[in-house]
Amino acid sequence: MKGTDRAAVLFLLPSFIFVGVFSLFPIFESFRMSFYQLILTLPWLGQKMVGWQNYVDLAEDPVAIESLLTTLVFVGVTIPLELLFGLGIALVLNEAFHGRGLLRAVVLIPWAIPTVVSSQMWRFIFNDRYGLINFIFFGGDVSRYLAPLADPHLALIAIMAAEIWKTTPFAALILLAGLQGIPDDLYEAASVDGATAWQKFRHVTSPLLKPALLLALLFRTIDSLRVFDLVFVMTQGGPADTTNVLQFYGYKKTFAEGMVGYGSAIAVAVFLMSLVFSLAYLRFLNPSRQEA
Amino acid sequence: MKRSVTFALFFVGIALYCLVPFLWFVLTSLKSSAELTAIPPKLIPSFHWGFYQSALEKYGLLHYIVNSVIVAGLATLITIVIGSLAAYAMTRFQLAWTHVYLLILLAISMFPQIATAGPVWSILDRLNWLNTYQGLVAAYIALSLPLAIWILTTFFREVPREIEEAALIDGCSRFQSLYKVILPLAAPGILTAALLVFIYAWNEFFFALIIMTDPTVQTLPVGIALFPGEYTMPWGEIAAASTVATVPLIVLTLIFQRGIVRGLCAGAVKG
């Protein structure tokens, strides 16, 4: 090892220790534990190697299958809407107008609010008696008030609405950064050629926005696959498991029921989903690949 | 003038979308008990501070605030020190494996919390660090280092090499050159990274929930999520505690919005 390398390692060592002990080792440990049977409430069974059994159980667990579908619906509905609203906001923020700086600051507010706070806030807005939503829809007619969070058809929709509200600003900011990277002379050239606003969007903005879109898509999908706070606060996975997303199910199995091996298998499944989504996006959206 | 009208409409629409839900919660916290349950709901409250008083006196709000300040403050401080050392090494020594480390950090931040939570809990259990500040702080340092190192390397790279080389020739050690040359020049970047780490640690819920089961050491998000009351929720107090937990963050965000936007984009776009 060269002298500079040794000095560099000294600078890097503290970060290696924390990342190694509290991130890398736990990740490997989770993979390992997913092949073991370990139930904290039944300590006399010990820690037994069971091979793929946890994964077989997972594939045959109807609650896990439903949880997987719920998670996919959650991601499939929230991500496109977040990106769509985010793109709308980004297009507005990209124009020059009075108060643009102010609006950009305001857009950051939902992002800055702690998720637990926004979860309680939306839980109150959807409240069956004092909720704003009920008042907006039914006015003072209390007899028609709904309890969205206790309704198996509405609870997931309510949680998705809360998620979209909170995460749209992040998508908007990433897309705005992408828009600002597009050189103005391209639009000027298009104007000279007589392009309409839609044609400019279609042929200048959208191809050049692809890298930013890919990033927003990647970050938001990975994050939304691990949704937890909203579900914990708003519904605890209910009613009738209709909002029981995978990370919440894994949490319940590991920490409420002490099924460490099975919970680890759920964790690995969530990670593999992130990986599959990421690879798929890179495969289909990566601009450098398409040029090749 | 059609254009300016369109933009005014967009402006108002976006502002309402972002502000109304939270504003409603803030107004709720300022109501009296009778106003809270009124149908139709009262739009403008009587600016009653009763819910704040009760949140402080009956629900121990101050306690949660102190815990959050300690945990998020310590986590931010240590993460930035460790992250700066790492970012310095990665930008100033010609290392072949800098990119590998950055990619590993990125990959780690892709994992769901549940993938590390169980083993982290066991490690802290063995260290007797469950329900302690250092336990949660250690977890937060590891969780926020990837973001901090990504942002800091982006900013450190922008400090011209020549300035530092001059300092080294003048006899500065590597460590002196880091805190006498790089840190002052990269101060805006460090502030940005610190803010993002602080906001992350202040808002984090999952690890706080599993590590802090003793109410005396719980942070604000845990306190707010586990507010007691099964059938009649104390909505006024929850709204008051939520407002207290959120307003400092909103103020920070508004003051430093340029830096935050840049940091978020540095963290994301460089990925």
Image (spheres, coloured by chain):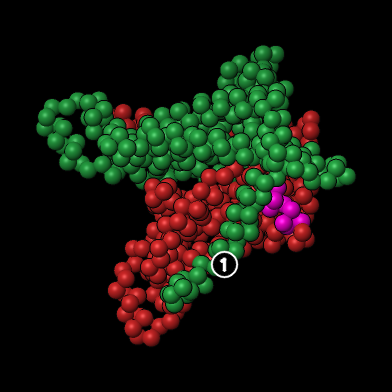
Chain colours: A green, B red
In this rendering, is residue A232 above or below B152?
A: above
> Which residue is identified by label 1?
A14
SS for tag 1?
Answer: helix
Subunit of mark 1? A
Q: Report the side of A292 relative to A35 (left or right).
A: left
Residue closest to the far bottom: B171
Quadrant of residue A233 within the rendered picture: top right
Q: Give percent across and percent down for residue B255.
A: 45, 54
Could you classify mark 1 by the number of other residues whose Cα lies within 10 Å: few (under 14), some (14-19), or many (20 or more)?
Answer: some
User: Mark 1 is on which residue type?
Assistant: Pro
Residue drawn at x 43%, y 65% as measured from the top left: B90
In this rendering, is residue A273 above or below A142?
A: below
User: What segment is highlighted magenta in the picture?
Assistant: B118-125
Q: Nearest the camera: B164 or A103? A: B164
Q: Give percent across and percent down for residue B181.
A: 39, 75
The total of numbered circles placed on residues is 1
Q: Nearest the camera: B240 or A7? A: A7
| Magenta residue check for B123 | yes
| Magenta residue check for B65 | no
Residue drawn at x 50%, y 42% as measured from the top left: A111
- Residue A135 appears in the figure: yes
Q: Nearest the camera: B230 or B90? A: B90
Q: Report the side of A272 relative to A93 (left or right).
A: right
In this rendering, is residue B186 above or below B146?
A: below
Q: Give percent across and percent down for residue A119.
A: 62, 36
Is most of the magenta stretch helix, strand or loop? helix
In this rendering, is residue B110 above or below B62?
A: above
Quadrant of the snapshot with the C terminus of chain A: top left
Q: Nearest the camera: B92 or B43? A: B92
- Residue A129 appears in the figure: no
Residue closest to the far right: A44
Residue drawn at x 20%, y 41% as measured from the top left: A184
